[in-house]
């Protein structure tokens, strides 16, 4: 069941991730730092941009374009995985708060 959820999630995220502009804007907006632990991206991608992973905070993906920045956060790979492993509500709460203040 969980895997199915994940697949749906990834597929939908793909549509966002295919939009290079949105991806760049969100990662740039995060200042190249993970929005959970605050550390710098662990490495740069092939284009020299900080590598962070984008994660949607809601399972409902009927997101209006202008709301995207309020629903997606940029995370280092460790924190992104940590959310999956621990599912700590405090982490999600913190990220929702941060995302709500995005103004890119
Ligand atoms: Zn992190």
Image: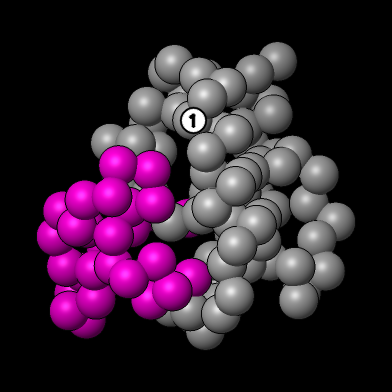
Q: Residue at x 37, y 31 (%)?
A: 81
Q: Which of 4 and 17 is in front in this view?
A: 17
In the image, is 96 to the left or to the right of 52?
Answer: right
Q: In this view, does 4 lie above or below 24?
A: above
> Magenta stretch mostly in which secondary structure?
loop
Asked whether residue 72 is in view, the answer is: no
Residue 29: quadrant of the picture: bottom left
Q: Residue 6's x, y, as percent?
A: 61, 32
User: Which residue bears the numbered disc 1?
Assistant: 91
Q: Position of residue 93 (x, y in %)?
A: 59, 34
Query: Where does the image place residue 71, in percent across and percent down from the top left?
Result: 66, 55
Q: How many labels does the image show?
A: 1
Q: In this view, does 75 lie to the left or right of 101?
A: left
Regarding residue 38, the answer to whether it shows in the image is yes
Magenta segment: does it hold 24? no
On the rendered image, what quadrant is the N terminus found in? Answer: top right
Question: Which one is in front, 79 or 101?
Answer: 101
Q: Look at 68% across and 66% down and name the residue there.
A: 68
Query: Is 41 inside the magenta-drawn segment?
Result: yes
* Residue located at (43% from left, 56% from top): 74
Left or right, residue 82 beside residue 46: right
Q: Is 85 placed above or below 93 here?
A: above
**Vertical placement of residue 97 versus 79, above or below:** below
Q: In this view, does 38 lie to the left or right of 72?
A: left
Dividing the image into 4 quarters, which one contains the C terminus?
Answer: bottom right
Q: What segment is highlighted magenta in the picture?
A: 26-54
């Amino acid at each position: 069941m969980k895997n199915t959820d994940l697949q749906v999630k990834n597929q939908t995220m793909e549509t966002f991730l295919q939009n290079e502009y949105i991806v760049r804007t969100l990662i740039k907006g995060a200042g190249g730092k993970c929005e959970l632990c605050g550390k710098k991206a662990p490495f740069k991608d092939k284009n020299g941009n900080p590598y962070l992973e984008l994660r949607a905070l809601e399972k409902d993906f009927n997101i209006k374009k202008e709301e995207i920045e309020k629903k997606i956060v940029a995370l280092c790979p460790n924190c992104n995985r940590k959310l999956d492993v621990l599912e700590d509500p405090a982490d999600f709460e913190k990220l929702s708060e941060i995302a709500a203040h995005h103004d890119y």
